[in-house]
Image: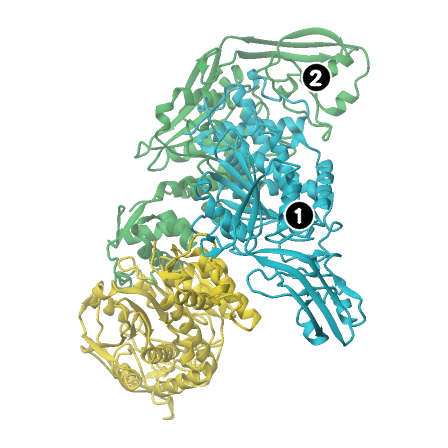
Chain colours: A green, B cyan, C yellow
Amino acid sequence: MKLTDLRSNFSPSEAGEQMHRLMSQLYPIPRSITGDGIRETFRVIGEEIPLEAHRVPSGTRVFDWEVPREWQIRDAYIRSPDGEKIVDFRDSSLHVVGYSTPVDRRIDLDELRQHIHTVPEHPDWIPFRASYYEDNWGFCMSHNRLASLGPGMYDVRVDSSLEPGYLDYAECHVRGELDEEILISAHACHPALCNDNLSGVVLAVAIARLLLGTEHRFSYRFLFIPSIIGSIVWLSRNEDACRRIRAGLVVSCVGDGGDFRYKRTRRGDTVLDRAAEHVLTNSGHRHSVVDFYPYGYDERNYCSPGFDLPVGSLTRSSHGTFPEYHTSADDLEFVKAAFLGESLSVYATLLEVLENNGVFVNRNPKCEPQLGRRGLYNVTGGLKEGRSQEMAMFWLLNQCDGTHSLLDIAEKSRIPFDVIACAGARLHDAGLLVEGSA
Amino acid sequence: MKLTDLRSNFSPSEAGEQMHRLMSQLYPIPRSITGDGIRETFRVIGEEIPLEAHRVPSGTRVFDWEVPREWQIRDAYIRSPDGEKIVDFRDSSLHVVGYSTPVDRRIDLDELRQHIHTVPEHPDWIPFRASYYEDNWGFCMSHNRLASLGPGMYDVRVDSSLEPGYLDYAECHVRGELDEEILISAHACHPALCNDNLSGVVLAVAIARLLLGTEHRFSYRFLFIPSIIGSIVWLSRNEDACRRIRAGLVVSCVGDGGDFRYKRTRRGDTVLDRAAEHVLTNSGHRHSVVDFYPYGYDERNYCSPGFDLPVGSLTRSSHGTFPEYHTSADDLEFVKAAFLGESLSVYATLLEVLENNGVFVNRNPKCEPQLGRRGLYNVTGGLKEGRSQEMAMFWLLNQCDGTHSLLDIAEKSRIPFDVIACAGARLHDAGLLVEGSA
Amino acid sequence: MKLTDLRSNFSPSEAGEQMHRLMSQLYPIPRSITGDGIRETFRVIGEEIPLEAHRVPSGTRVFDWEVPREWQIRDAYIRSPDGEKIVDFRDSSLHVVGYSTPVDRRIDLDELRQHIHTVPEHPDWIPFRASYYEDNWGFCMSHNRLASLGPGMYDVRVDSSLEPGYLDYAECHVRGELDEEILISAHACHPALCNDNLSGVVLAVAIARLLLGTEHRFSYRFLFIPSIIGSIVWLSRNEDACRRIRAGLVVSCVGDGGDFRYKRTRRGDTVLDRAAEHVLTNSGHRHSVVDFYPYGYDERNYCSPGFDLPVGSLTRSSHGTFPEYHTSADDLEFVKAAFLGESLSVYATLLEVLENNGVFVNRNPKCEPQLGRRGLYNVTGGLKEGRSQEMAMFWLLNQCDGTHSLLDIAEKSRIPFDVIACAGARLHDAGLLVEGSA
């Protein structure tokens, strides 16, 4: 019996380096929830994995919302009274508030200040701000630079447009044996910010590549979308597809060194929820598991009551809780290849649980069968592994009455799922277990 | 949408003073489970709130019991060998054991001692004793006074009568929109004891006054009864009314400075139980919540298996656990106006939860609706209140699928019920929520 | 109403001495899973309690196993190069590996060492080893003795036979009022080892004697079997009888001074499981309660999924966890009469719970009945016992609605079961409770 084995197919450290390189390539592209930046992002991802592009016209009604106008940003700067460019969009896409309306004016410092955002607690960092649903313009800069400005008249210019256009998103579909799907959703609309959420984008790409090279049971759908409005758009166009989703993960903030954190689905007790907790518990990594709450990333929409999909979120540091969040300090240095590699391992382990979690029936339910004469007792040389394989077999023979899945048995026995699954395959191959439920 | 709002209608400190004044008025009346004292008590209460008086003849069969004879006490004293009145009922109604049979004898100190009760650990305090169901007589006095008595013959006199008469109780019924009732039960039979239970009597009066001046949904029934036998009598005559009771509280010991304590209903998981725990948790007051046990006050009868009413008990220090309990030290000093005011606030908060706990359905269950264009996002100036209103709205929109009450959502979100209820009213008024269940 | 009362019928210290004497008698018999040793063991037990002997021919198919050949051991020794008997089966039956095949050879020290087992951490102790299902031979000795051996040729002789014969087991059936049975299972196949498991054998004998002299409700079946294969054989021949089993205990390791330990049934929430936890909690003894796991003694088979019997195991130190386990140090000194007596008390208390756990209905379910006029209030002189009897009565009157057993009420009230059962009998005798369920 063949188990889906993802972890043998990569080295975490090499995969981490590869993810970091892709992130470096994506970093300079000036992204927003619409416009050329996100399109260029999808083009780069499409060089890594097969990607299907979708676009929806501005003004399209999507549930209670409508698709916003497309924002194009060409240039933005502030020129000081003595003619120096003190803020320049060409230095960092963070400098202009997302969805800023066009402006070309000369204003005094007091008025200018009302359009400037800084991070006073970290006076060297530039914050990230956007104003998607209210017409506005503004600049982001370091607090120190703002403090150094003298009185006088400043030239401010935002060369942008807000016109009817399109909202873009992209999907990568990886077929498995089954029609049932696992969803991996990453938002791809933030500008030069690495942990939130280029780390999620490159991890999703790495998982897709892994699955493309491995036999597996479930089909997988990877979504690369603008945050919040993207999931609303996707859900509005894929209500049928939702019925096939057996589990889903919103992937985000997986490149920093923080503890792992799994946020449960709205239902809270799905196989995904139990698998994620089991995997984190056995991972040796520090971690936490929190109940669903209707805030955060796109799980807000996947878990809205009209959908209530079994979608959780597996991250490291959580949105809004690390100082670098939504600032220029969330950069290519903050995210490390090694952390990305670790995160890929944890995701792969979790997907293996979902893939291999079957239900078996013991064909000799009355008393233990004799393992010795089948060569299953003390089968492995190394005492420790042998003992855990034997204990796993005893648990399987006792619990495989058709009502317990392998994950149930792993939880009950406190034996890691992969040890249980491996012992299950051996017992199956020895004819002692058959697939099926009571 | 209009919420029942009790707390805006009083100031805890002023209400506390008012309650304490009423308590002072009731304190000197020599009460027992029958007789003129309890009748006079009802007359005074009747000056505060509309009161319906009931009387049941002695000897009436009430379930396994019968209504006892009526006890009248006119005078009681002990005169020392040198003619001094060393104990005098006119000084304190506690001096004579409740339901003492008449006596007029001259006895020596040894025999006298067998009829004297004291509190040796607090030698200045007078205990409270009664012997309702066994014919007996006795006196209560300070341990110091007893110790000072010399040998000789003492005149003891109890000028009482135990004759067929009536057991009295009183009800105040406050109509709401609904026929369903909330029961508030206070025993009113103890003589000069304040926390147990004049504090309960005056708190019940204050709640009734509050409800009389406020629109509300439930109807309320306030019972002022002699302890234990009173609830047996009331239940025996109101089996039909019991079917309308949705929640009930035995109110007692609410005037001392001890931690709040909620004793659950026999069922343990009624809306009342959850509301009480939620309110205490969010009150900021130290508190405990304990499971039902078949001992204590009249909840013993309300929660007998043949009734099993959803009646709990919300007190501060619990019966029998504070040194002043059933002694002369449970006096007008021990109970403070401020504590009564606090208790009224907690009761009012709890009743608001019961009143406002509805079930709503999100009319836009697929993805979050756009709060911004309805002026519901960042609606309040103060960031903190605004954020908690927004979070409350997100929770409501996510959980209002017709299976969760507002209290369910308050519990799950760990947001205080009143914040949830207020956000629910706003979403209702914006047309985003409708009342009803799935 | 008559309660089954086992504990009044013995003194733990005397019963402990009696058990220890029987253990001393059984200790020298050279037992294995088949053969004359286990037969002689049953003969000795049969002098204490009525015993039914059973035998099953070698080769009989029992589920996935077959009954092994019968092993007879007559003599076994190692003679050193200078002719000294350095190991002699006549000194201790532990010296020869169980089920050793016959051997009569002269071999050098290197070859000899491959057939020698010792306990290096305790160099004076002799281990216990057996090889029931793989043909082999060997000796067990102290590590010190092994270390002292010089080079040269050694004579080794095992005068044994492995021939078709029989597997023996024995049953003692003690009738009660009911056909429903409680199973007590002890393995009786280990040679000179006291805690594992002569302690279990003598405790089972003591319980059987106790029940033979006491009126009781359940019927009891005591099994004395060879470990593992014995329960497989018994189950294969008694599938019908299994349907009558309401609870079962695998008794083992009950003579050492370790904490008590109850291992739950596979179902985990049977009456037995709750009764065992309740009894241990109220015993005052240090103890632990662990979930079922498919390893250990014969509960592995009783709790295999095809049977799933409500069988747990109540021991003191658990198999494999004390250093003396399966060594010569598990001897008549290691097991103390006082510990055996304590264990008997705990078992008797547990069986009393199973025996006396009825369901009653309060005939006066509306309000408390008046205990005073029935002499049930303050009935006992000693205040403490009286109060606990009163509280037990209040709990019973409140909870006896036909849905709660006495054990339910004991758990809920945190009052020991025997106090509840005694109060229940009083209320029953006073006509306030009747047997029966809702």
| Tag 2: amino acid | Val
Nearest the viewer among B66 and B22 is: B66
Distance from label 1 to label 2 (Cα)?
73 Å
Residue C252 percent across, percent down from the top left = 39, 73
Nearest the viewer among B42 and A392 is: B42
Mark 2: few, some, or many residues within 10 Å (few <14, many ≥20)?
many
Q: Is residue C301 above or below residue B32?
A: below
Kindly state the secondary structure of the residue where label 2 is placed.
strand
Nearest the viewer among C38 and C392 is: C392
| Tag 1: amino acid | Leu
Residue C319 percent across, percent down from the top left = 42, 70
Label 2: which residue? A87
Mark 1: few, some, or many residues within 10 Å (few <14, many ≥20)?
many
Label 1: which residue? B198
The chain ID associated with circle 2 is A
* Residue sitting at x 32%, y 74%: C187
**Can residue C127 be seen from the camera position used here?**
yes
B82 displayed left or right of C29? right
User: Does the CB distance between marks 1 and 2 fall below 8 Å?
Assistant: no
Image mark count: 2
The disc at residue C263 is: none
The chain ID associated with circle 1 is B
Q: Is residue A430 above or below residue C134?
A: above
Kindly state the secondary structure of the residue where label 1 is placed.
helix
